[in-house]
Amino acid sequence: MRRTVASSRSIPFLAIIASAGLVSVVGCSTVIAPVTQRATAGLTSAVLDHDDPETVRLGAPAYLLMVDALIAGDPDNSGLLVAGAQLYSSYASVFVDDQPRAAKLAERSRRYGWQGLCHADTVTCDSWRLPFDEFEAIIDQVQAKNVPALFAAGASWATWVQVNRADWTAVADKARVEAVMKRVVALDDRYRNGAAYTYLGVLNSIIPAALGGKPEQGRADFERSIELSQGRDLMTKVLFAQEYARLVFDRELHDRLLEEVIAADPEVPGYVLTNTLAQEQARRLLADSQDYFAE
């Protein structure tokens, strides 16, 4: 089962790391009423530290509707739009198996992400419709104060690409996602403990080196992300194994990373939900290792 070309599976779980921001309305707390701020902060903590993904899956839709209502009441609020982008991105990529439904939710996520970045930095408005060189030049003008909106726009776009990965026109947008995440890294590579590096690691591990890919750069990106999170975010190691180690057919690295994830304590504040999901995926990948790496 050795993978030699980019497949329809090229970007799965690209946006699952966004689950660390499943209810990250805290990022827009300065533009929400104090009572709402306290409520969302408490809910954020409760969800991110929950060890039962099914409970979160069942409860999240109500919160999605609440954020939709907040955005409807204040449609120019960049912080709320960023929160909406993160919510829909995470929910669509992690908890929705039905492709048409996931595509609809991912499109809302992407729309919120674009609008949030536009309101945060008007130079970016409508840039996503421009030719790539012009788009990249505009993204390179975004300033450090707008990193949260830039990251949310990139993450929600990555989810949209993932959900629509059967459409090669959509997959071609991965170059734009990469440009966004490179700018995040240039401005603040420690943002969300290096999460942008995880995205770059996946993007650089899609295509084998023989076909023009950059898997060794992908490995460096994954390793930097692990370094910045101090190994607390187990999902990065899962993606490192799934995307890089399987691409280069390195079973020793693959199994070691997954065994480290399974053996780790998932009870890390702010990462419990993500780490629980990571351990579930690690067990599935490790169980499939023998077949995948068979000569």
Image: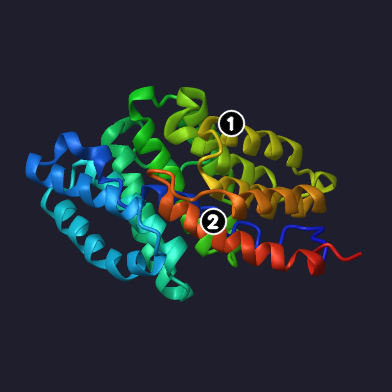
Looking at the rendering, in which quadrant would you find the C terminus?
bottom right
Residue 158 as seen in the image, left or right of residue 263: left
**Looking at the image, is 222 positioned above or below residue 99?**
above
The crowding category of the residue bearing disc 2, from other C-alpha atoms within 10 Å (few below 14, some 14 to 19, many at least 20), is many
Query: In the image shown, does 167 or 33 lie closer to the viewer?
Result: 33
**Looking at the image, is 225 positioned above or below residue 291?**
above
Return the mark for residue 227. Answer: 1
- Say whether disc 1 or disc 2 marks the residue closer to the N-terminus: 1
Residue 109 as seen in the image, left or right of residue 205: left
Residue 112 as seen in the image, left or right of residue 221: left
**Looking at the image, is 246 positioned above or below residue 181?**
below
Q: Which residue shows up at 30% across the image and 51% down it?
A: 23
Residue named by callout 2: 278
Q: Which residue shows up at 81% across the image and 53% down it?
A: 251
The crowding category of the residue bearing disc 1, from other C-alpha atoms within 10 Å (few below 14, some 14 to 19, many at least 20), is few
Query: In the image shown, does 276 or 11 lie closer to the viewer?
Result: 276
Q: Looking at the image, do the residues carrying marks 1 and 2 touch, with CB atoms under 8 Å apart? A: no
Query: Percent position (x, y) of residue 211?
Result: 81, 48
Amino acid carrying label 1: it is Glu
Give SS at disc 2.
helix
Q: CA distance from mark 1 to mark 2?
A: 17 Å
Q: Which residue shows up at 87% across the image and 66% down it?
A: 294
Residue 257 as seen in the image, left or right of residue 290: left
**Quarter-wise, where is residue 66 in the image?**
bottom left
Query: In the image shown, does 267 or 257 lie closer to the viewer?
Result: 267
